[in-house]
Amino acid sequence: MTASYPARAGQAAPDLHAQLADQIREHDNHTRAALTATHDEGAGPLTADPSTQSAKPSANPSRKENKMTTTVSPATTAELDALAADGPTALVITVIPELAKALLKRNTRNRKLRERAVGDYARDMKAGHWTINGEAIKISVNGDVLDGQHRLYAVIAAELAVDMFIVIGLDEATQETMDSGRKRTTGDALALRNETHAVTLAAVLRRVWAWQQGDYRFKGRQSPTTAECTQLLADHPELRRSAEIANRTRNAFPHIPQSVLGTAHFLFNAINPDECAWFFQRLADGAELPLGHPLLALRTRVTSERLDAVRLPEDRHMAYLIRTWNAVRDGASLDRLVHKAGSPVPQPK
């Protein structure tokens, strides 16, 4: 079905439509000319001259030059309406906070807003991690926002201009089929990068990120985005080793989650790599641990609770590991390991 975008209050005059269309055609003509000149001169790959790209109106760290892409910058919904053609139309739009606010006034048929998702997106935008990945904000033939409300709210929260794909002129019935696929996880993203132990590595990255935010019980309202996890991995490539040790220890002693083991390994290794290596080896095999040794108390405690079918929260496991580590570092004996539920998680030393 073909449909044209309806006029709205404050709709731009036809000459505005022509002006914006001319802007796109002019940009495309310049790009083609640059491509032809580059090809004729034999000056390497067939790419556009950066000088022919349209100027970006905002010094936004989340925005990167998109070669061979036409980007337009409507400031109002009236200017956006003027870009519509017959049927669905896809464009790259520079979404400024003012335009996002105006579009959200048309957000009348969407699901409940998840503030956590807005915060995640806004952090990525501010950190320069937001990229055009093909996912689009979707607008109906009647001008309603069908998909993309969290991204629009994030633009407002970040107070930045962000380039995004937008599709306008969609039938409202298409909303029922949107966002029906399975969300790609951080583990999926790491697997696409051929990371070993991708699922465990993703779990460790999320908990190390939370620890660095001061969330020592892993129960905070914020969780890292995939971009924040990959940045953390770039900053601390040793986390790959922590994930490997976590899997190896879990295979030998299956009573503590890999996510907690890997997080503890990362923290302990930063304090003393040699003692950390010995600690996790003895945790895994239990060899030559005399009575009263903290690691023997840890192994006994978590084994007993596992046999009793007690499902411990991750912060309790983390507290057990840190109390054991601290006792080993102090050279103290420990006959029985105790951590009261709800007590603060200690810091490793």
Image: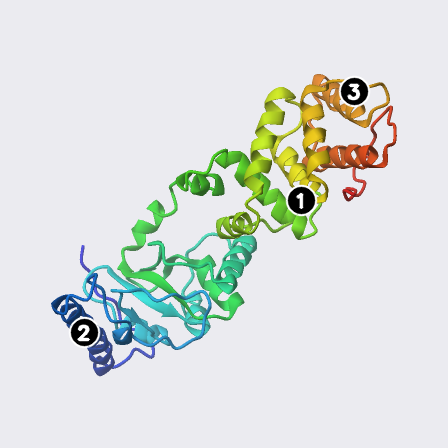
Kindly identify which residue carries mark 2: 25
Q: Quadrant of residue 76?
A: bottom left
Residue 230 in the image: x percent, y percent?
Answer: 50, 49
Instruction: Say above or below: 89 vs 287.
Output: below
Q: On residue 219, which mark appears? A: 1
Sequence order check: which comes first, mark 3 or mark 1? 1
Left or right: 113 as drawn, with respect to 295 = left
Q: Amino acid at mark 3?
A: Leu
Q: Residues within 10 Å of mark 1 (few under 14, many from 20)?
A: few
Please tell me whether mark 3 sits on a helix, a strand or a loop: loop
Q: Amino acid at mark 1?
A: Lys
Q: Residue at x 77, y 44 (%)?
A: 347
Residue 306 in the image: x percent, y percent?
Answer: 70, 20
Does the image show residue 8?
no
Sequence order check: which comes first, mark 2 or mark 3? 2
Instruction: Say above or below: 25 vs 323.
Output: below
